[in-house]
Each structure stands twice: as structure tokens, then as C-alpha cells.
Amino acid sequence: MSGKMGKSTFKINARMLLELGAELISSDGIALYELIKNSVDAGSSTVKIQIFNALRYSEYKSLLESIDQAKTGSSVKSLVSKISAALEADIVEQARNFFEETVAVATSIRELRSALVRFYHRANSIIVEDAGEGMSLQELNDNFLTIGTRSRRKNRVGKGYLGEKGVGRLSTMRLGDQLDVRTTKAGEARYNRLVINWSLFSHDSDLRLQDVMVRPRRGKAKDDPSEQGTTISIRDLRSDWTEKKFQEIIVEDFGRLIDPFVPKSGNRLLRLFYNGKRHYLPVIDEQLFKHAHATCEAAFGLEGGKPWLRGFVNYRLRGKERPFVLGEPELRGITRSLPFGAVERLGSFTLHMWWFNRQLLNKANNVPNATEIKAMVRRWSGGLMLYRDKYRINPYGGPEDDWLSLDKRAFSSRGFKLNRQQVVGRVVIDLDNRALVEQTNREGLTDSPEKEALVALLQHILFTQFKEFLDECDKEVRVQELTTLENLEERIEATEDEIGKRLRAVAARVPEERKSLDEVEDLVGKLHEYIEQARALAEEYESDRAKFVYLAGVGLMVEFILHELGRATAHTLDTLRSIEKENPAGSLPATVPASFATLSEQLRTIVKRVDTLDPLSTSRRQQREDFDLFQLMRQVVDSRSAQTARHKIVWDGNFRNDDRWIVNGVKGMVIQIVENLISNSIYWLEVQREIDPSLQPKITIDLDQVDEQLIFTDNGTGVDPAHSERIFEPFVSHRPAKDGKGLGLYISREIAGYHEWTLTMLKEGTVRPDRYNTFVLDLSHGRKPKGSK
């Protein structure tokens, strides 16, 4: 091959290229990081970045303006002095010498301007060096000058790459006007060079695009043919550079962009220099982890093609830990709104998180270096950062990003148990995972079902597994504190008289301290008031508990009825619109009566649903009465007939028999229990049908008068034995947030308890191996109304 390539057809408009670079590369830190990623993708184990700054860009432009405005005969010496005063204090010796040889000896305004331009060009630069595989002359021509090239991915199949969008070269445009690329592959005799003057493509240039040719060429011979790697030199820098700015980029950008949870991983890769001075990446001090009040670890993957999620939560503050394991049914329930297969295509990931209650980070809570630890929390908190292997995907976990809605949910719930300022952690996705793709502008992942699946699973871990466990533990502590109220009050009463006697005795002996003693008596009185307030709060909670449970249950049922009503009316409106389009003249085809007949049937079904709310009306709330449980079950099932027919669910069991079983209870509350069980069954039957399309969904209700039990079974996914008690806890759900609030089973058990009944899961005779499918409502303990004689 000849020493020069043919004309490179820079096949995109170069001015547009500059604008594209400015759009995609949002900061100098990101620009440098893109070049780092290119070096890593080239297989380099180290990347050296050197910033040489003798004169700030803003000062340079200002000095040029001063020279241009200087009149003929102006003092060159005074201008030289002004330039010298603007030089950075830590300028390297070579730059200082070059200044003395050029700018300092200028004798005219014109000569001074030329010398200043040459000085800025030579003394200010950014140099990025690596020892990667390098580029041949052909690759330099074909790949470096074509935006969007994924050459590494194409040439080395099976390996993951960070810079797969081919936009790293746009970084050089942002950083400076002059680009000089020197690269070579092992075995080549010469270096390959590419020099570009980006300023020729600016709006200020008068040159036409076709007048600017960009030609890679052969460089000088190599001393060692085995040498490989790339050196990118950028000059005529476009922005101010200072040591402070470089350090901020290292801390704020590089410090998070290269996984700080892997000790010194960044410092092994990067060698960073500013005007010859070495700088190092920050790492997370192990002390920080030791002071976390709670931790969470989780891993997601596939086994035999089936997804699983495992992990644990350790609430160190309370000394409690709980593992969690979710199989295919639960995971499909969480992500059911997404296209089938999104979870499997997601690929594996791991999560590590540390949670801090910042109010407890003080010396009183055995944190001797509290100020230092708080500063670490502020430095590294912000939510979960996302890493592909050990390289971060922006902007997740950054100051302005709330990709998992931690702050949004914390504020909406008026609680700060879990917000970004309390969380330090990361999620690591696999290098070879290609279902999660970065946006071209590096602002996160492109929207896809797989991304939604990742977010849904992470939110489940954070809000259902982690936060709810912490809330449960804290609630237990509060309950324990309430149970000590009586003992505490007794102790205060027992000692109050004794304290009073002693205070009066002291006052008699030391009259001048009467005021202080009065304050002590006031404190004792306030303690008594606090105890009374706590007792009143506890009694109020107990008296309102049944009301809360009842109202929450009604709310869930009303929500369902509104959904059904909205669905029916929307269907009819769609039908009428289609009729109007097909019959603009106003004639009414035979389909109209049929459409209204369908609507009428749907509304009759909804009326049945509304009728079930009648026993829940305010006037009849909590009024116990005798009623036929067989008849009530038929009423509830009939009201669900339209919905279950749509889902092709069949009903089984003896509830349709003509038997009678008179029970005593709050009729509306019994309806709530069964309604919640049916709602859950319909959802999980659909999930099971996605897993097994051949499923014939069925719900069975049997009434056992001998053992006084209502037995409710479906052939859906069933419940993991590990979750058979947790599902009765409030806000615990394996469904997407918009499809379930995690209150149904909690309300049902509370209602059962109100009647002195029990609601449990049957652990024998399950439909599916290692899953529970049957709920048992045991009425044998509540034969008499509360308070009856």
C-alpha cells in the first residue's frame, strides 16, 4: 500500500458532525470518558491522560482581543507582561521555556499575536495514550471517520464493549480544534497518522466542504515493530482547564464511572496527570460500609431457562435478617404488564446496597468519626448506580437522577425511610448482556421491555423486600415500646410521691434552688402527660382499626367495579363510533340493537356487583346477622360471571348446591374476604396461563359445615411456601404497583380476626409441587358475636 490513502470521503456533512458532537457529548468529563472506553475496548490495561495547561482558554481569547485592539505603536512589552501574568502558576518547564523563546521576545504587535497563537497551540493540550491493539491505516480510514461504526463488536464477537456506538471520536471535537491521532498495530513497521483541524468545519469558516480533505497517512518508522497502541493529542483547547476542574472530573465523573466498589480498580487502569502532577481516583473507604444501618444483596439469573431472584436484607440496626427467593411465577407476576419473554432476555444482574439512617450517625450512637462518615455518605449516596461490568452507565445514581423513583415514593408517602440520600449502592449487569443498550448520547439505557423489567425487579427488591422488612422491624419495636407503657406509668406513679418528698426536703434546706427544683417537678409531670398521650394513641388505633380495614376493603371493591363499568362503556362507545363511520347517512343497521343488548347484559352484571356493596353500606357496617353462606357465595360468584367468562375461568365446588349453612357475622365483610381471594386468583391464573398456554383455569369453592370451613382453591401459580405468611402482611405484593397494592389478603385476614375466625393457607394436597394453592377460612372459633352473653 502506498504511503497515503486515497481521498477520504467524509460522507457526512462536517458542520453537522460538529453539532452532533456537541449534542451527544454533554461535558468535558464525558468526552474524556468516551476516549477511555475506546482504549478499554481496544484491549489496553492502562490509559494515560495528561492535561497540559499553561494558559486558560478564556484568558487566551481575552488576550487576543487586547492585542487586536492595540493601536500601532502600542507597548509590546506591557502586553507581554499582561500575558505572562495570565499564565498558570504550575506551568511545566518546557512550556515556560517556549514562552520565553517566542512570546517574551516578540517585538511587534503582529509578531506577538502570532507567537501567542503558537504558544497556546503547543503549551495547552490533552493527550490520551493506550497500549491497545491499535488501528491499521485502513481501519483508521474506514472506522475512525465513520460515526456509528461498531467495528470492535463485529471483529471480536462474543465480547462486550463499552463504546459500541462509535461516538468516542466526537469527544475530540468538544475538547479542542486540533486532533492528531497516532496509532499502530503489532507487527506494523510504521505508525499511522490522522490529523484534523475541526475549526475548518465551523460556522466561521469560508471553506466549502469539498475543499477540506481528511487523509490518514503513514507516519514515521517504529523502533520496535511489536509496539501497539494509540495516542490521541488534542490541541487548541475549547474550554478552560485548571487543576481544580480536572480534580472535579476525577471525583465526580471518573470516581463513579469506574466502579468505586472494586478497590483501586480505577487507579490500576488510569494514570492521570495535570501539568505533570499525578492524580488518583477516589475509592470508597471500608469504614463507610461498617456504619451502614441496613444492607441488601440480590442476584437475578436463569436456571434451565426459568428466571429466579434471590437475596437477603440485613437490618443491622435491629439485629434482624431475612432472605428472599422468587421463582418464575412471582417474577412473571411482577412483570406481567411487559411482553412475554422480557424477563428471560434481561440477562443476569447483581445488587449491593447499603442504607444509612443519617440521624443516627453521631457519637451518641457509637460513631466516633461521625462527621467523616456523614461526608462519605453525602459523597457516595444518590441511589443505585448501574455498571456494565465495572464501567458505569450514566446517569443512573447521579445527583439529578431518580431512575428507581426512590425520592418520588418517599415524598409521596410522607416518609423518608428510603430515599436517594440514604442509599449507597450499585447494580451490575453482565458485559455480554445486549438486551440493555445505552442511548447514543450516553444518557441511560434505551427504552425497551428489558429495561422496564430491570426497573420493575429492582423496585420490587427496594420497596417490597427491603423497605417493608425495615418497616416491619421498626413496627415490632414500637409495639414493644407500647407494651411497656403500663409498667412505665406504674413506675412513675410509684416514685412520683417519693420524688416530691425529696424535692421538698431539699428546698427546705436550700431555698435558693427552689426554681431548679420546680423545673424537675415539671419534668416529672410532663413524663406523665407523655404516657397518657401514648396510651390515648394506642386506644385510638385499636378502636379505628376495624374501620380502617373495612374502608380499605370497600375501596378495593369500588375500584374494581369502576374498572368494569369503564371497560363496558368504552367497548360500547367504540362500537357506536364504528357504526357511525360505516353508516354516515344515519341508518341504523341490525348490529345496533345487538350492541345495546350486549351493553345491557354487561350493566346487569355490574349492577350485581354493586348490589354486593349494599351489605357494606354505612348503615349496615359491622352489624352481625345470620345469613346463608351458600347463598352468599352464589351471589358473589354470579356478580363475577362476566369477568370470569372473559378469562375462560370455570367454577367448581359444592357452593352451588341447594344446601344451607347459616352463619353469624358481618355479611359485607365476608363478601370482602371472598372478593379479595377471587381477585388474586384471576390475576395469578392469567400468569400461569402465560407460563402454560394449555391451562384450563379453574376456581373451586367448597363449604365444609362439619369442620366449619370455607375452602378456596385455584389451579394458578400457587404461593411459594416461603411467602405463605408474608402475603398476609400489608403492602406485600408480587404484582406491579398499578395492578395491586398488597392489601387484599391483609384486609381479609384482619376481617377474619375481627370475627375470631382464621384465614390461612393449606399446606397439604397442593395443585402444584412445592406451591400452595388453597386458602382456608375457618369459622369454628367465631360462633358467637363479640360481647354476646
Image (cartoon, rainbow, N blue to C red):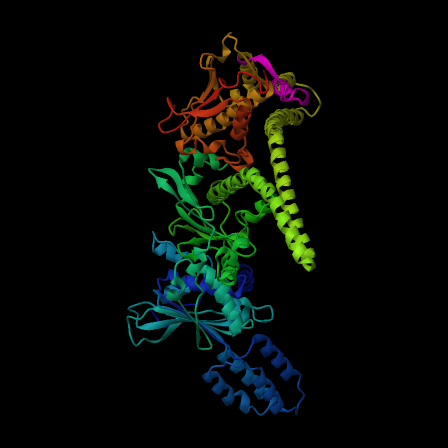
Q: Could you tell me if residue 362 is visible in this image? A: no
Instruction: Residue 52: give x, y in percent of width and height.
Output: 48, 76
Return the residue found at the far right: 586
Looking at the figure, which quarter contains the N terminus?
Answer: bottom left
Vertically, is 728 above or below 18?
above
Name the residue nearer the viewer: 348 or 15: 348
**In the image, residue 626 lies in the stretch drawn in magenta:** yes
- Horizontally, is 441 left or right of 139 in the view? right
Q: Tell me which residue sits at (51%, 24%) in the image.
A: 677
Instruction: Residue 402: give x, y in percent of width and height.
Output: 55, 50
- State which region is magenta: 605-629
Looking at the figure, which quarter contains the C terminus?
Answer: top right
Q: Could you tell me if residue 719 is visible in this image? A: yes
Vertically, is 230 above or below 121?
above
Vertically, is 495 above or below 228?
above
The tally of labels here is 0
Vertically, is 596 above or below 158?
above
Instruction: Residue 547: give x, y in percent of width and height.
Output: 62, 28
Name the residue nearer the viewer: 726 or 275: 726
Instruction: Residue 636: give x, y in percent of width and height.
Output: 56, 18
Return the residue found at the far top: 658
- Horizontally, is 572 left or right of 723 in the view? right
**In the image, residue 293 lies in the stretch drawn in magenta:** no
Q: Tell me which residue sits at (49%, 23%) in the image.
A: 758
Name the residue nearer the viewer: 487 or 589: 487
Q: Tell me which residue sits at (55%, 57%) in the image.
A: 399
Name the residue nearer the viewer: 512 or 784: 512
